[in-house]
Amino acid sequence: MSRTGADLALLLLGGFRTLVDDAVDELARRGHHDVRPVHDFAMRAIAAGADNASALGRHLSVTKQSAAKTIGVLQERGYVAVEPDPGDARRKRLIVTELGFEVMRQGEAIFEELRAGWAARIGAEELATLERHLTTLVGARPIRFDTPGGVGRDLT
């Protein structure tokens, strides 16, 4: 059966979607039913230094208002908090809470489990070959981890 370039793109997108959906479902089974991929992107950006709505908006390629809405949700759920900036008492900064870091750690562990499941289905060597080929085709770090939808290329 001959496939088109569009088929390839959809298969790759389908693989991504399958992993992400399965991870979200597993996080829900582990008690974090309120976590979405954008929350992980946002917490990782905050942990990397995006400590206000403007900076988070830039990291996520969204408006400041959209970032502020995401911050509100994350604060309400206990994943991020606001604290005084030690360098400027007039300024507040965002931080990821221990609960937020725990959710990120669980997410990372879940992706490792999902990867192991794929290895069990197609064989560890086949999966390693697939990963090598994808690395050759798209690079070792093709997508910025803090960009929802994976549209931000890593240009560094």
Image (tube, rainbow, N blue to C red):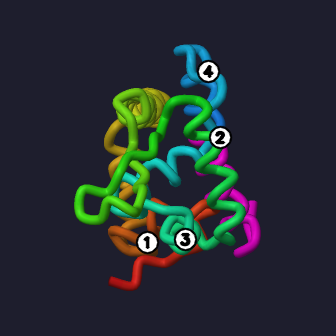
Mark nearest the camera among 2 and 1 is 2
Dot 2, how many residues are within 10 Å of its Cα: few (below 14), some (14-19), or many (20+)?
some
Label 4: which secondary element: helix
Q: Position of residue 117 (x, y in %)?
A: 46, 28
Q: Are marks 4 and 2 in contact (CB under 8 Å)?
A: no
Q: Residue visible at 39% across and 84% down?
A: 155
Q: Position of residue 104 (x, y in %)?
A: 41, 37
Mark nearest the camera among 4 and 1 is 4
Separation (CA) of disc 4 from disc 1: 28 Å
Q: Residue visible at 56% across and 38% down?
A: 75
Number of numbered discs: 4
Which residue in the structure is indicated by mark 1?
Answer: 142
Look at label 1 and name its amino acid: Pro
Look at label 4 and name its amino acid: Ala
Which residue in the structure is indicated by mark 2?
Answer: 73
Separation (CA) of disc 3 from disc 2: 16 Å
Which one is earlier in the sequence, the residue at label 4 or at label 3?
4
Which residue in the structure is indicated by mark 3?
Answer: 54
Look at label 2 and name its amino acid: Val
Q: Position of residue 92 (x, y in %)?
A: 42, 56
Separation (CA) of disc 4 from disc 2: 17 Å
Which one is earlier in the sequence, the residue at label 4 or at label 2?
4
Which residue in the structure is indicated by mark 4?
Answer: 28
Q: Residue visible at 68% across and 71% down?
A: 63
Dot 3, how many residues are within 10 Å of its Cα: few (below 14), some (14-19), or many (20+)?
some
Question: As displayed, is residue 118 above or below residue 86?
Answer: above
> In terms of depth relative to the viewer, which is nearer, 33 or 129?
33
